[in-house]
Image (tube, grey):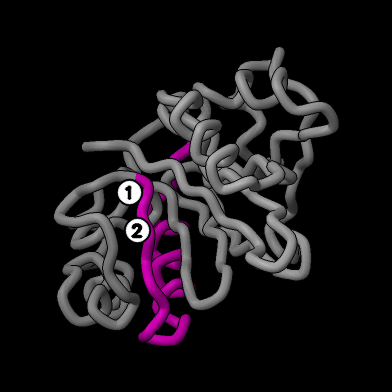
Amino acid sequence: MDNFSYVLWDADGGAAAVIDPAWQPERILEFLREEKLSLKLLLLTHAHPDHVNAARYFLESFEGLALTLHKEDLFLLDTSLKPLNLLNGKEELALGRARITVLHTPGHTPGSVSYLADGRVFTGDTLFVGECGRADLPGSDPKALRLSLLKLAALPDATTLYPGHSYNGDASTIGVQKEYNIYMKLAAEGEAGFLKAAI
């Protein structure tokens, strides 16, 4: 059940992004300093507290930094967290010379997003290794979750999957999940079977 926070960076210029800042911000900051990275983006896959509880630490430590999340998850966020950069879900974010594509993948929460960068997708609690996110929480929608899994399944099979928690493993590929993840398989087969399993 370990939470994952991720650091992405542009190797050419050192511009960095932190995805889902939670629990141990000092370790993340130490890594940024060791690698001589400059934090430019603070990104949420969704606004549940276990993925955002270190955001304030970074917002207070880095001038000009904004918390980036989908506008549909604003209702889950502590209202004192500012400033905010609200997404619609189809953006391309610049990180130095690198680019991060935002995929709106609702279901676990209405504003869940996945971040796609250089053949890697960071899925938060939408898709895990061998599992999918819960769809029985306030704001969850199992029908939307199925469509989000289909959207992720449309990515190239070689795309590396980095989930928000360590259920059954820390990483995989989209191709492996399409073959072995029962929720991905049920999503592809139709709505009725998926809803039965996901609720």
Membership of 199 in magenta stretch? no
Residue tagged by mark 2? 127
- 52 on left or right of 56: left
Q: Residue at x 51, y 32 (%)?
A: 30
Q: Quadrant of residue 69?
A: top right
Residue tagged by mark 1? 133
Q: Residue at x 63, y 19 (%)?
A: 56
* Distance Cα–Cα, label 1 vs label 2: 6 Å
Q: Residue at x 63, y 27 (%)?
A: 75
As helix, strand or loop, the secondary structure at mark 2 comes to: strand
* Nearer-the-camera pick, 63 or 171: 63
Q: Quadrant of residue 137?
A: top left
Give the extent of the magenta segment.
Answer: 139-164
What amino acid is found at the position of numbered circle 2 in the picture? Leu
Q: Is residue 35 above or below residue 83?
A: below
Disc 1 packing (10 Å; few <14; some 14–19; many ≥20) = many
Q: Where's residue 92, x and y in %?
A: 74, 66
Among numbered discs 1 and 2, the one appearing first in the sequence: 2
The reply to whether residue 110 is in sight is no
Q: Is residue 99 above or below residue 153?
A: above
What amino acid is found at the position of numbered circle 1 in the picture? Gly
Membership of 141 in magenta stretch? yes
* Nearer-the-camera pick, 80 or 182: 80
Q: Where's residue 46, x and y in %?
A: 53, 41
As helix, strand or loop, the secondary structure at mark 1 comes to: loop
- 132 on left or right of 4: left
- 49 on left or right of 71: left
Disc 2 packing (10 Å; few <14; some 14–19; many ≥20) = many
The reply to whether residue 180 is in sight is yes
